[in-house]
Image (cartoon, grey):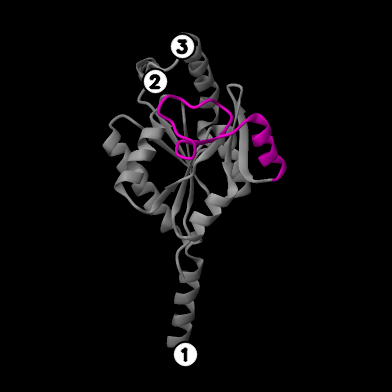
């Protein structure tokens, strides 16, 4: 029987580099699937529908909510973000480890519904580095940067509810660390009940 994939939720402050880590993880290893979120925000330059996000109008998104087609959804900086259910279920049953890149509010909702989910929080080495990264993007106004820093202060209150904290200082090392965490999760006893039962039965048989 094929081993079922693990659901991994990755959160982090805006500018912590979580998106870059996820892309590099998918480039290096072939067992991961990145869940594409739906959102009502406008596409940024270079983004394509169905690749970075499924871009939806507010009525379209609210229809998905009504039809329970989302694992979770939240409102963040005046836009909806949510995780389509069908894609996630399909990939997990194929044995792929599915990564959701969502914010804290959504992450905790997923953990509530699916307690075996692994929660990872990506953070920069310091708050100063976070601000420098946001400025370095060159995609946001000063007001938006201030708003994201304030939001980071609020999000920091929920960091202790995550299973793992990963500091993104050097990208390559950070990607490898995330991969090793997920590999270790596959070895946890509660994810290997069938194997445990099989060994127990074999031992009973051989000890008769």
Q: Residue at x 69, y 39 (%)?
A: 63
The earlier-in-sequence mark between 2 and 3 is: 2
Magenta stretch contains residue 79: no
Q: CA gap, disc 2 to disc 3?
A: 15 Å
State which region is magenta. Answer: 39-67
Tell me the quarter of the picture where residue 55 sits.
Answer: top right
> Could one spot residue 116 in this view of the protein?
no
Q: Residue furthest right?
A: 66
Classify 10 Å Cα crowding around label 2: few (below 14), some (14-19), many (20 and above): many
Above/below status of 24 relative to 15: below
Q: Which residue is mark 3?
A: 141
User: Could you tell me which secondary element the residue under label 3 belongs to?
Assistant: loop
> Could one spot residue 87 in this view of the protein?
yes
Q: CA gap, disc 1 to disc 3?
A: 74 Å
Label disc, if present, on residue 208 of the rendered structure: 1
Magenta stretch contains residue 56: yes
Tell me the quarter of the picture where residue 134 sits.
Answer: top left
Q: Position of residue 143 (x, y in %)?
A: 50, 10
Q: Nearer the viewer, mark 2 or mark 3?
A: 3
Q: Which residue is mark 2?
A: 130
Q: Are marks 1 and 3 in contact (CB under 8 Å)?
A: no
Q: Position of residue 170 (x, y in %)?
A: 28, 31
Q: Residue at x 59, y 29 (%)?
A: 40
Q: Are marks 2 and 3 in contact (CB under 8 Å)?
A: no
């Amino acid at each position: 029987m094929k081993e079922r994939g693990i659901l991994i939720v990755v959160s982090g402050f805006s500018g912590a580099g979580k998106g870059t880590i996820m892309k590099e993880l998918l480039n290096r290893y072939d067992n991961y699937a990145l869940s594409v979120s739906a959102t009502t925000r406008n596409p940024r330059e270079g983004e394509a529908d169905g690749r970075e996000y499924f871009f939806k109008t507010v009525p379209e998104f609210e229809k998905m909510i009504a039809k329970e087609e989302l694992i979770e959804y939240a409102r963040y900086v005046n836009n909806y973000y949510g995780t389509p259910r069908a894609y996630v279920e399909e990939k997990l049953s194929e044995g792929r480890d599915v990564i959701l890149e969502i914010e804290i509010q959504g992450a905790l909702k997923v953990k509530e519904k699916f307690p075996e989910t692994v929660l990872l929080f990506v953070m920069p080495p310091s708050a100063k580095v976070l601000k420098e990264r946001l400025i370095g993007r060159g995609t946001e106004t000063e007001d938006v940067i201030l708003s994201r820093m304030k939001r980071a202060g609020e999000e920091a209150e929920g960091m202790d509810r995550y299973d793992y904290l990963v500091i993104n200082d050097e990208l390559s090392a950070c990607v490898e660390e995330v991969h090793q965490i997920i590999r270790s999760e596959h070895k946890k006893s509660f994810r290997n009940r069938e194997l445990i039962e099989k060994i127990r039965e074999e031992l009973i048989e051989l000890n008769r």
